[in-house]
Amino acid sequence: VKTLRTQSLDLFPVHVEVIDFEDDPELNAALLEAARTDPALGSSTSGKSALAGDAPWVSKLRARYAHGIGAWLGETMSGARYDLEAYVFFNYTNGSSFTPVHDHLIEADLVAIYYAHAPAQEERPDGSYYAMDPGVLVLHDPRLDARLDRRGVRTKDHYKIYPRTNRLVVQPASIRHSVTPSPGYERLAVTCTVTVNRKDLFEGYLPLDLGGSEHP
Ligand SMILES: [Fe+2]
């Protein structure tokens, strides 16, 4: 039998880092207190970045992001120079909640989600798609035909990440994600949207003036 030249390729992986830091009750309690008392921290657009303040928790939170984002970049852009900018906002719930599928392409290249407070729950990553546990972060496969690939949990059309206090998730802004409904518990996810090398990318761009023209 003639040997066929065969290239068996797995292309275009999505890199995600999930880091469980050591418990820092002081940091997490301070973040929870800030979330409960300052709703302005919950704005992803018009508010000011939560890292802009001088609260004592800012440097500790920044260090956790730096570790996780550095790990992500170290795996994917090893040796490269990066120019990073970031915006941080709180995602706080103490009632029932649900987040539909979305991405962060318009405002970021990377997203880092830090859970300052999440209820303890048993992790069942292989559980049914149709019977999800409450409050789970679900990453959705960007491939349109993901149902054809049944090799295992890494190639399933979704991947579940359970929120856990002290857990940081770093993922590309492009990956669509959602949060399953939860009936009413307190959870604080602090989200950091990061741009990578945007200044370089935008070099040579000039302001675009539409001249106040009226759109029909
Ligand atoms: Fe999100």
Image (cartoon, rainbow, N blue to C red):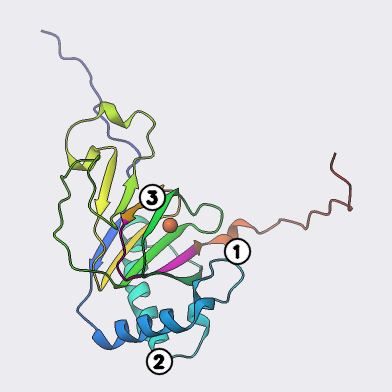
Q: Position of residue 56 (x, y in %)?
A: 40, 92
In this view, 193 is above or below 145: below
As measured in the structure, the alpha-carbon distance from the residue carrying label 1 to the one carrying label 2 is 30 Å
Task: Say what amino acid the circle numbered 1 marks.
Answer: Lys
Specify whether 107 is left or right of 92: right
Residue at 36% x, 81% y is: 32
Whether residue 31 appears in magenta in the rendering, the answer is: no
On the image, numbered disc 1 is attached to which residue? 199
Of badges 3 and 1, the one in the foreground is: 3
First in sequence: mark 1 or mark 2? Answer: 2
* Nearer to the camera, 122 or 93: 93
Q: Residue at x 35, y 28 (%)?
A: 145
Where is residue 206? Give x, y as percent.
Answer: 76, 57
Which one is in front, 129 or 139? 129
Give percent across and percent down for residue 20.
21, 69
Residue shown at the point (24%, 27%) measured from the top left: 8
Q: Amino acid at mark 2?
A: Pro
Label 1 element class: helix
164, 8: nearer the viewer: 164
Most distant residue in the left direction: 1
Q: Position of residue 174 (x, y in %)?
A: 45, 49
Q: CA distance from mark 3 to mark 1?
A: 27 Å
Relative to 196, is 103 above or below? above
Q: Please indicate whether residue 155 sits to the left or right of residue 201 in the image.
A: left
Residue receiving disc 3: 177
Residue 14 visible: no
